[in-house]
């Protein structure tokens, strides 16, 4: 039997991520590209790049799940699933003992409870504000004239942190401006920002609870300082994927694979 | 009372209103087709529209004929009916503004005058109306009296105080002590006494004398109407349910704002007959009802159609809601032989004046008796008494009953708060959980 390939395309607010797997779950490509202003074009571009990386063509792909905010704009997808379900499935594939997924994405963050098959049981999401998200960090990095890597330096978690509100990105930015005006050390501000995000996540965690192992997904998982703070707050160590940004796309590819086989089964029975 | 005003009112009632209704009916013939996901629409919708349009239309001519009272949804209006007040429900009017997607404009007017954005949007819309005179209902009559009860929230008192101050008119407040564990005898006596103390004030404002027999008649009618409304909601236990809760949000208007009047009593008999008929014939509100849901909190008025369609297309039907149930839940206490205390029991124990344990028990019972598969909770800053505690309720219900649930952060009537993409993702994820469970 020849190999069947499946893809997940996650069109997020900041990045468009693609993952291609075969029916055994082996990963052939993982691609992260900026979404820009046109989600539909970004999806095409990232998908083509991903195919090239995997040395495949479009006709080789049996099923494609689109996910993320721009999922409706992916014309070539064979199915659509929310990023919430996709992150649950993706995290479970990487860490099978995952019971809880914390995803900190570009413009939202969520806590997802999954069952032993990676199926979503419950979830909590941030409200109408980007505080506690990747976008929040981007805005602050700009203001502090740091790149995201510099913003992610692990810090002494017991060290001083400047108090920064966790309710609004724009107001938090004003707070940062006034802290800079008062010559507050940048490390303290960075620490305060990380703490602010952790506090937002903590609110969601307490609303639905933690079960099993906890896997952190989304680009913010690259932020080592934040991970350390979050681990301290939760009192446990987090599973961190090698490519936290493509977990949603990976989940999408697995969902495409399942959907393909269940359609096949129902059409042959 | 002026003879001219009375004559005008009578002409409008007998000829003007029917003519306007007939005109509306002609306009309505061009209505959009019903999407496939829905069953046949309720015939009663037409009568409902007539009743409500007529009520607002006639209110334009009521000045100088009847005294006008503005009333809150949980106030014991039966007492006012005994003095023949023409009642306007600002909450109902604000919902109407919200449904027309104009809430933001009206709220903006109130905010411009210094009212905080954190105040209930029903209140801001009403204040916006008062300050600008704007209304989609043509024109609302100025009140002679304000009548509110804090059994639904504390905001109403300050909201009505602001109107009383602006218009320099009397305000009667019915103070209902919150039921922290159980309603006490002292609470009941306190409320019963307040109701009796209102009589001389109402006599003075209305210029009419209080007759106990008339009041008892109204009370009886109100009891019977609420009972019928309860039976209509009960009929939604049928599978498939003959109505969706989105229909019920609309059909709720007479029990809220025309309670105690013959028109409301008659209307619910019409609706009951139709609903019964649909149950007998197995006609569902949606074409293919696969999942049954419960709704918590007030409707999102500017998105009723969107939500109804979103769920119907996924074969999901809302079959019950704590909101619609509120006008049937406690009216069983009403007793003509003991009017004052029985009203105290009825109005003092409504859901928003009762503790969370009570709400949990009520919701658990509703979920079981209506064979509910999932729960959607609308969290709204406008209605704090309804929204506070929802996270705890959700936690308890999802754990005890293994029921998927989602909380939507939106608003009852201020459409500016709605965030389409975020809500969409939450709703789709909720549906994925439900379909996967």
Image (cartoon, rainbow, N blue to C red):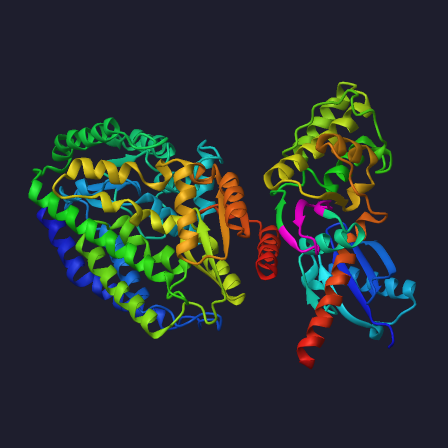
Task: Please state if B199 lies on the left or on the right of A36 as rendered.
Answer: left
Q: Quadrant of the N terminus of chain B?
A: top left
Q: Is residue A83 magenta?
A: no
Question: Which quarter of the picture shows residue B21?
Answer: bottom left
Image position of B192 with respect to B33: above or below:
above
What range is drawn magenta here? A99-121
Q: Do we see residue B347 in this rendering?
A: yes
Residue A97 falls left or right of residue B225 = right
* Above or below A61: residue A210: above
Extreme residue in the top direction: A182
Q: Nearer the viewer, residue B380 or A116?
A: A116
Quadrant that contains the C terminus of chain B: bottom right
- Residue B188's spot in the image, x, y percent? 23, 31
Residue B330: give x, y in percent of width and height.
28, 44
Q: Position of residue B424 (x, y in %)?
A: 59, 55
Instruction: Evaluate whether residue B300 shows in this view.
Output: no
The image quadrant of residue A136 is top right
**Magenta part, dominant SS:** strand
B325 relative to B400 in the view: left or right: left
Residue B321 percent coordinates (x, y): 41, 52
The residue closer to the viewer here, B377 or B209, is B377
Residue at image location 73% in from the left, 42% down from the top: A135
- Is B46 placed above or below B156 here? below
Q: Nearer the viewer, residue A207 or B74?
A: A207
Q: Residue at x 82, y 47 (%)?
A: A241
């Amino acid at each position: 039997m020849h190999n069947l390939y499946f893809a997940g395309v996650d069109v997020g607010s900041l990045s468009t991520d693609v993952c291609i797997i075969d029916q055994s779950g082996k990963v052939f490509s993982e691609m992260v590209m900026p979404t820009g202003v046109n989600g539909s074009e970004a999806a095409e571009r990232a998908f083509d790049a991903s195919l090239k990386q995997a040395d495949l063509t479009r006709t080789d792909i049996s099923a494609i799940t689109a996910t993320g905010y721009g999922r409706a704009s992916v014309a070539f997808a064979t199915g659509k699933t929310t990023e919430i379900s996709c992150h649950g499935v993706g995290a479970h594939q990487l860490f099978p003992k995952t019971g809880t997924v914390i995803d900190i994405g570009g413009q939202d963050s969520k806590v997802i409870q999954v069952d032993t098959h990676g199926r979503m049981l419950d979830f909590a999401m941030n409200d109408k504000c980007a505080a506690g998200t990747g976008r929040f960090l981007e805005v602050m990095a700009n203001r502090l004239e740091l790149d995201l890597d510099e913003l992610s330096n692990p810090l002494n978690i017991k060290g001083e942190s400047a108090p920064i509100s966790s309710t609004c990105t724009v107001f938090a930015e004003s707070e940062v401006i006034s802290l800079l005006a008062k010559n507050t050390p940048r490390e303290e501000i960075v620490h305060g920002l990380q703490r602010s995000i952790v506090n937002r996540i903590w609110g969601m965690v307490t609303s639905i609870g933690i079960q099993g192992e906890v896997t952190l997904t989304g680009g913010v998982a690259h932020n080592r300082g934040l991970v350390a703070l979050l681990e301290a707050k939760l009192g446990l160590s987090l599973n961190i994927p090698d490519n936290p940004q493509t977990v949603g796309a990976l989940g999408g590819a697995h969902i495409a694979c399942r959907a393909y086989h269940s359609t096949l089964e129902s059409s042959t029975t | 009372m002026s003879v001219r005003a009375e004559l005008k009112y009578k002409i409008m009632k007998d000829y003007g209103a029917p003519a306007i209704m007939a005109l509306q009916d002609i306009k309505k013939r061009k209505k959009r087709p019903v999407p496939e996901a829905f069953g046949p629409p309720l015939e009663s919708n037409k009568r409902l529209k007539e009743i409500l349009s007529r009520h607002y239309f006639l209110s334009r001519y009521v000045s100088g004929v009847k005294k006008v009272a503005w009333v809150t949804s949980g106030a014991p209006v039966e007492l006012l009916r005994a003095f023949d007040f023409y009642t306007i429900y600002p909450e109902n009017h604000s919902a109407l503004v919200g449904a027309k997607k104009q809430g933001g404009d009206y709220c903006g007017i109130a905010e411009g005058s210094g009212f905080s954005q954190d105040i209930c949007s029903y209140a801001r819309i009403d204040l916006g109306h008062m300050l600008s005179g704007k209304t989609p209902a043509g024109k609302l009559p100025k009140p002679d009296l304000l009548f509110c009860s804090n059994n639904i929230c504390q905001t109403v008192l300050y909201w009505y105080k602001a109107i009383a101050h602006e218009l320099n008119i009397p305000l009667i407040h019915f103070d209902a002590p919150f039921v922290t564990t159980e309603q006490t005898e002292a609470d009941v006596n306190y409320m019963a006494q307040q109701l009796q103390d209102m009589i001389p004030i109402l006599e003075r404002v209305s210029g009419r004398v209080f007759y106990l027999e008339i009041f008892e008649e109204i009370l009886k009618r109100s009891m019977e109407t609420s009972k019928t409304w309860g039976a209509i909601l009960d009929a939604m236990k049928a599978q498939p349910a003959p109505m969706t809760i989105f229909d019920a949000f609309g059909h709720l208007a007479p029990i809220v704002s025309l309670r105690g009047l013959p028109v409301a009593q008659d209307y619910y008999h019409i609706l009951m007959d139709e609903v019964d008929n649909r149950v007998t014939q197995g006609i569902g509100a949606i074409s293919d009802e696969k999942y049954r849901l419960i709704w918590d909190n007030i409707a999102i008025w500017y998105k009723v159609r969107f939500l109804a369609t979103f769920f119907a297309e996924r074969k999901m039907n809302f079959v019950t809601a704590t909101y619609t149930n509120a006008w049937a839940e406690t009216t069983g206490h009403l007793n003509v032989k003991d009017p004052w205390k029985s009203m105290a029991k009825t109005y003092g124990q409504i859901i928003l004046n009762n503790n969370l344990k009570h709400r949990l028990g009520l919701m658990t019972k509703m979920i079981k008796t209506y064979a509910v598969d999932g729960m959607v909770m609308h969290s709204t800053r406008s209605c704090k008494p309804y929204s506070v505690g929802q996270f705890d309720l959700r936690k308890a219900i999802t754990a005890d009953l293994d029921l998927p649930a989602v909380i939507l952060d939106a608003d009852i009537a201020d459409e500016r708060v709605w965030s389409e993409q975020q809500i969409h993702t939450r709703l789709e994820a909720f549906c994925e959980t439900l379909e996967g469970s």
